[in-house]
Amino acid sequence: MAKLQSTEIVGVANRPATICSNSVCMWFDTTNLKPMASYCGYGVGSWSAGGALITARHSAGGGGTQNEAVVAGGYSNASSVCTEEYNGTSWSTGGAMITARYGLVGAGSQNEGLATGGFSNTIGTRLTCTEEYNGTSWSIGGSLITARYLLAGAGTQNEGLAAGGELSTYLTCTEEYNGTSWSAGGALITARYYFVGAGTQNAGLVFGGSNGANLSCTEEYNGTSWSAGGALITARIGLTGAGTQNAGLVTGGLGVDYCSCTEEYNGTSWSVGTALITPRYTFAGAGSQGAGLVAGGSTNVVLSCTEEYNKPLIIVDCYL
């Protein structure tokens, strides 16, 4: 990988010439006059406790990174407007949403966030309204074509993706956001709700959920149409995810019981990761496969606890 060209290992000579392929770099030690190889990869990930949310809630929308995350909306005793921002250690209060909602989808970053869909028990309906966050306050964006809640989404504020969900029936319809308005995209293969997405508008990923039965199927989006990906090991609803189409992360949810199981996606198949500290479902997620974040959710009580997922970077040099 190109990044290895600027990586230095203590006690190893400089690297004037480097040829990289996937996670292995070939280079020449000009001091000892020997060819060398460097392997770069990630170790086993693990969850650790982060700072608790100010307001316990479930079914909120999340976005951003592990050190710059945002969580908005959700449900505790009613639909919520509250927004919180994470700095890698603790949560602080952000600007309130315009429309209280839960079961929404969040995307984008802490300073360029996107929230759409959901359900408001104040209004008593599934929503089409979209809001954009600038790091301080929310403003009104373009409305979804189809009202829905418990949908999946991904992408950025100017290239958002929303798919599936529920509106009296399970939906397959996909919509794409250009920063101003939503337009129709390719339909999901499997209608579903209570599921999660990751990735970008042109390289999206959705997995899990329900169409009356818990699902394990994964789908990948190329900006035009969905295709089948590798199935989850554990079928479940109310799970959360993060990462990209080729490096996805999923954890928690509700299967036979509240789930703590974590899985990682390599673009083809899912493998087992380290379990969450606290099993939960209907919670918010953000970050990447190597640096993930989850917050809130529900078991038999509404939760405020946050967890961070980290995979150590490992670089090994050897003479050929």
Image (cartoon, rainbow, N blue to C red):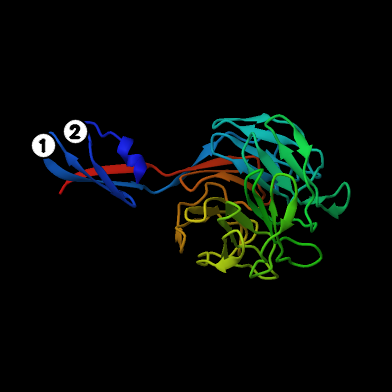
Q: In the image, is residue 199 above or below residue 57?
A: below
Q: In the image, is residue 187 above or below residue 21?
A: below
Neighbour class for label 1 at 10 Å: few (<14), some, many (≥20)?
A: few
Residue 308: x percent and y percent?
Answer: 52, 41
**Mark 1–mark 2 CB contact (< 8 Å):** yes
Q: Amino acid at mark 2?
A: Ala
Q: Secondary structure at mark 2?
A: loop
Picture quarter containing residue 68?
top right
Picture quarter containing residue 151?
bottom right
Q: Is residue 167 left or right of residue 92?
A: right
Q: Is residue 225 left or right of residue 105?
A: left
- Can residue 273 be seen in the rendering of this structure? yes
Q: Amino acid at mark 1?
A: Asn
Residue pointed to by mark 1: 32
Q: Is residue 85 left or right of residue 139?
A: left
Q: Secondary structure at mark 1?
A: loop
Which dot marks residue 51?
none
Q: Residue furthest right?
A: 123
Residue 205: x percent and y percent?
Answer: 57, 58
> Disc 1 and disc 2: Cα gap in Å?
8 Å
Towards the viewer: 27 or 310: 27
Which dot marks residue 13?
2
Residue 108: x percent and y percent?
Answer: 63, 42
